[in-house]
Image (cartoon, helix red, strand yellow):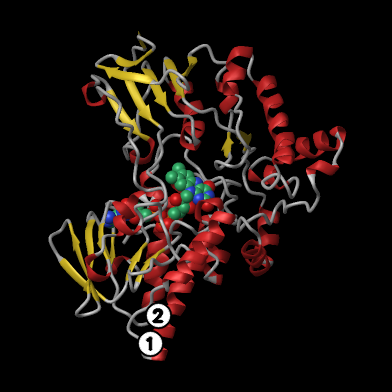
């Protein structure tokens, strides 16, 4: 279920095993995340040479990325290329939503019902539904009565949006907001950003790819991929983690190291020291540095203070930006703090905060996703003896390796909850899961087994391990 990176690679492997397989996809094209998220400024924050499939030597040698961080359009072109190159399209059914998957105890088969009215019966069901695919639009009173245009960053119109001459509200300050606000601000008359929680961002310093450097990586790609697989975040070939504690560095060393990483740009910032994500005192040194940068970049001290988070750097995925903080120096951009005084309601003319109406023509919901479990829980999944997945997960999601759930035989969740997923370069994590599922199917058939599912004890142990980490 799903025709993003995960669904496409799974289909390719199913073909390799000689299985009959079908991918069912809600959208009217392939690409998943990169099909849906067409907001201005949408791009990858893992370097493109690493955010790409490694399973096929010819593919990685022939494909040419143009920028250090690929745009949404370029990644979408890549996914389309993969679908064509590996002859996948004939087995993909588009514009169709899977509504229910029920395990039939008597036959050991899954019965899948979808919006096209066709019932499929399958031995295996692979949920390639995405961690960040179920768009989250907050249920603010009056939302549907707004007179202007509304957009969600994860459901962006294919033809693009013209904001010139418009007053725009952007609700949310996560990664999609950080990427899109500078573009919207450059076009619109006025932008009002509604911030509940300030977010940490480091500069991308995106640039065209240097062809000589690309050739060097391509000559040694297998080694790069292996290094990615061996690292905790599944990428980092450019700037690996330094195995040094921030707590052993004096102020001058810290400044020098953080300056260097800031100049390089991107998520490698968190690899400046090996304990930034393990020790709160170490993390505080990185926090102090970024707060200092925000104070330098933002002219108005009050706005700079509001933009400065008081949270752990990298606990919520760090944002990678291009001119985000400096955008607040523009005369047409205002920051509205809704941390203690939330948006009360949306009137026909705009959002109301603290009794004050903010009149706008358009609202952009940069409010992200019902992450990790959303896409799965929107499908009526029932395992053995009709047990709903929602029941099994009533106290939070439980899985084994993030790949399977006890009581749901032959159902797999690629990058499911409890796996590293969004904390990593997701393509590497997707490849690992797809290959695991492929191996599991081979092992089942070789051993003459019909189904595979985790034992309750194994699942409990895994959940305990994840919680401990
Ligand atoms: P998706 O690409 O989400 O595909 C899932 C598909 O399943 C969707 O097309 C959806 O329509 C379909 N689907 C879901 N439910 C159903 C249903 N019931 N019936 C039919 N179809 C269904 N990751 C990184 O590693 N680096 C990045 O820089 C990065 N940037 C990102 C930027 C944005 C804006 C977003 C939203 C995510 C980003 N990610 C990034 C995470 C990204 O989601 C993954 O990298 C990857 O694209 C996920 O692929 P996938 O196939 O698992 O899921």
Q: Whole-percent x and y of residue 66?
A: 57, 49
395 or 46, which lies in front? 395
Q: Residue at x 58, y 55 (%)?
A: 468
Q: Nearer the viewer, residue 155 or 29?
A: 155
Residue 152 appears in which quarter of the rendering? top left
- Residue 440 seen: yes
| Whether residue 431 is visible | no
Q: Give the labeled residue for mark 1.
A: 445
Judge whether 188 appears above or below 246 on screen.
above
Check the picture and name the quadrant holding the C terminus.
bottom right
Horizontal side of 226 relative to 380 (left or right) equals right
Query: How far across and down, in percent of the image, does residue 117 sit?
Result: 12, 60
Asked if residue 202 lies left or right of residue 435, the reply is: right
For image coordinates 48% across by 67% down, the residue present is 433
Q: Is residue 267 above or below residue 112?
A: above
Q: Secondary structure at mark 2?
A: helix
For the residues labelled 2 and 1, say whether their Cβ atoms are less than 8 Å apart: yes
Label of residue 441 in the image: 2
Mark 1, secondary structure of its residue = helix
Q: Give the Cα separation between the discs numbered 2 and 1.
A: 6 Å
Residue 462 percent across, percent down from the top left = 51, 64
Which residue is at 37% across, 28% downward? 364
Work out whether residue 92 or residue 130 is closer to the camera in this orientation and state it: 130
Hey, which quadrant is residue 94 in on the image? Answer: bottom left
């Amino acid at each position: 279920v799903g025709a993003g990176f995960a669904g496409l690679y799974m289909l390719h492997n199913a073909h390799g095993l000689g299985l009959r397989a079908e991918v069912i996809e809600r959208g009217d094209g392939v690409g998943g995340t990169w099909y849906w998220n067409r907001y201005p400024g949408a791009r990858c924050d893992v370097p493109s040479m690493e955010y790409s499939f490694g399973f096929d030597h010819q593919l990685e040698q022939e494909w040419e990325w143009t920028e250090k961080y690929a745009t949404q359009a370029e990644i979408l072109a890549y996914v389309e290329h993969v679908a064509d190159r590996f002859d996948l399209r004939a087995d993909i059914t588009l514009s169709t939503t899977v509504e229910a998957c029920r395990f039939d105890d008597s036959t050991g088969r899954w019965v899948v019902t979808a919006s096209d009215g066709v019932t499929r019966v399958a031995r295996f069901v692979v949920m390639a539904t995405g961690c960040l695919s179920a768009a989250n639009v907050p249920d603010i009173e009056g939302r549907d009565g707004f007179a202007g245009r509304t957009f969600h960053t994860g459901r962006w119109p294919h033809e693009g949006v013209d904001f010139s001459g418009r007053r725009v509200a952007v609700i949310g300050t996560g990664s999609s907001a950080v990427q899109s606000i500078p573009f919207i601000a450059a076009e619109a008359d006025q932008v009002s950003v509604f911030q509940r929680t300030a977010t940490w961002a480091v500069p991308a310093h995106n640039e065209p790819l240097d062809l000589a450097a690309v050739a060097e990586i391509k000559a040694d790609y297998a080694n790069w991929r292996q290094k990615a697989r061996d690292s905790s975040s599944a990428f980092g070939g450019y700037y690996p983690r330094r195995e040094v504690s921030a707590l052993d560095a004096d102020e001058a060393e810290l400044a020098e190291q953080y300056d260097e990483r800031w100049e390089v740009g991107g998520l490698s910032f968190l690899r400046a020291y090996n304990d930034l994500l393990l020790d709160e005192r170490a993390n505080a040194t990185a926090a102090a540095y970024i707060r200092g940068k925000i104070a330098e970049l933002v002219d108005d001290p009050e706005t700079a203070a509001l933009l400065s988070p008081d949270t752990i750097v990298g606990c919520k995925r760090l944002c990678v930006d291009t001119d985000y903080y400096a955008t607040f120096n523009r005369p047409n951009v205002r920051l509205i703090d809704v941390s203690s005084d939330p948006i009360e309601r949306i009137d026909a003319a705009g959002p109301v905060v603290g009794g004050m109406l903010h009149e706008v023509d358009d609202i952009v919901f940069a409010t992200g996703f019902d992450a990790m479990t959303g896409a799965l829980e929107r499908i009526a999944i029932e395992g053995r003896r009709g047990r709903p997945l929602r029941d099994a997960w009533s106290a939070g999601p439980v899985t084994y390796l993030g790949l399977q759930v006890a009581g749901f035989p032959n159902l797999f969740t690629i990058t499911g909850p409890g796996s590293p997923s969004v904390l990593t370069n997701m393509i590497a994590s997707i490849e690992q899961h797809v290959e695991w599922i492929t191996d599991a199917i081979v092992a089942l058939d070789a051993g003459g087994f019909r189904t595979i599912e985790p034992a309750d004890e194994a699942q409990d142990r895994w959940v305990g391990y994840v919680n401990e980490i």
